[in-house]
Image (cartoon, rainbow, N blue to C red):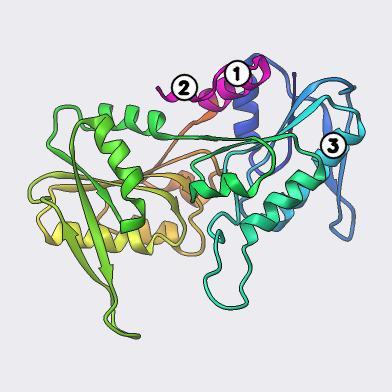
Amino acid sequence: MKIVACNSNRPLAEAISASLNLPLTKASVRRFSDMEVFVEIQENVRGEDTFVIQSTSYPANDNLMELLVAIDALRRGSARRITAVIPYFGYARQDRKSGPRTPISAKLVANMITTAGADRVLTMDLHAGQIQGFFDIPVDNLYAAPVLTKDMDKAFDGADTVVISPDVGGVIRARSIAKRLNTDLAIIDKRRERAGVSEVMNIIGDVDGRKCILVDDIVDSAGTLCNAAVALKEKGAASVSAYVTHGVLSGGAVARVTSSPMDDLVITDSIMATEAVRVSHNIKQLTIAPLMAEAIKRISDESSVSSLFD
């Protein structure tokens, strides 16, 4: 087995490598002066089972191109099998036509990864499960739930908790977490009566006096989470915490979270933390490295990946 790391999340790749007790394959991933991507694999990979670790997070296009070029380099180096390990799959939110003459970019990216030469894909908490069907190669979609619920058990041991879905679309994910914690589920229903009027958040479920746990897959601008925290506090919530798999946290998101009524925001290291995230007093990062490492080992051994979540 060979593990190749691109540049988007080097610390995660090194942690996965350490968990597998396997050194990273020597490779040069660099730019020419005009910012063209160049990848050189500096070890023999002929006949090897290879894994390329690369989140397609900011800068999404650069990181996606690095992944594609690395896959092509391995294919031309006669690797036996190439697995694209994409902890955070960028473009996943563009999974359908949102209006006339708009793209389905998630499908386009799936085609590009397949054409580059990947034999399978390993990712985590896809924004929409149907994206797996965009690929004509096997896709293993891992869930961060075991990592997140372990931290929830430690943080809220014995407390009166309720799991909150910040929108109707996230109910299935929130219900799964609520089932693991053996607690209740509540849903936030967002409505905007007309353009230019602020959203009205109706809370379906009992949150008064309880510790609320917001659950989502992606936090980008953090506007929805922060507004949800305000609405929950107004309804009498004792505390509000958020657990999110992918901390995109673009623009002023970190400042928004810091000044919000949220006690804490817990994210995973599927995306490398910025300096602002690292120094924030109410943002915490959990590692998915052992989970990803175990999935990589099982793929290489041709054993069951789904049994990780039984």
Residue type at mark 1: give it.
Arg
Q: What element carries label 3?
A: strand
Q: Closer to the camera: disc 2 or disc 3? A: 2
Q: Residues within 10 Å of mark 3 (few under 14, many from 20)?
A: some
Q: Earlier in the sequence, mark 3 or mark 1?
A: 3
Quadrant for residue 10, please give it: top right
Q: Closer to the camera: disc 3 or disc 1? A: 1
Name the one closer to the observer, 309 or 150: 309
Q: Is mark 1 on a helix, strand or loop?
A: helix
Alpha carbon distance from label 2 to label 1: 10 Å
Q: Do the residues labelled 2 and 1 touch (CB within 8 Å)?
A: yes
Alpha carbon distance from label 3 to label 1: 27 Å
Residue type at mark 2: give it.
Leu
41 on left or right of 276: right
Asked if the stretch drawn in magenta spans residue 296, the answer is yes
Residue type at mark 3: give it.
Ser
User: Quadrant where the C terminus lies?
Assistant: top left
Residues rendered magenta in the picture: 290-310
The residue at the point 48 percent across, 55 percent down is: 249
Q: Which of marks 2 and 3 is nearer the N terminus?
A: 3
User: Vertically, is 106 above or below 174?
Assistant: below
Q: Earlier in the sequence, mark 2 or mark 1?
A: 1
Q: What element carries label 2?
A: helix
Q: Position of residue 188 (x, y in %)?
A: 24, 59
Q: Name the residue under label 3.
A: 28
Q: Where is residue 216 in the image (x, y as percent from the top left)?
A: 38, 49
**Circle on res. 308:** 2
Does residue 57 show up? yes
Q: Mark 1 points at which residue?
A: 298
User: Vertically, is 12 above or below 264?
Assistant: above
259 on left or right of 47: left
What main secondary structure does the magenta stretch of the protein show? helix
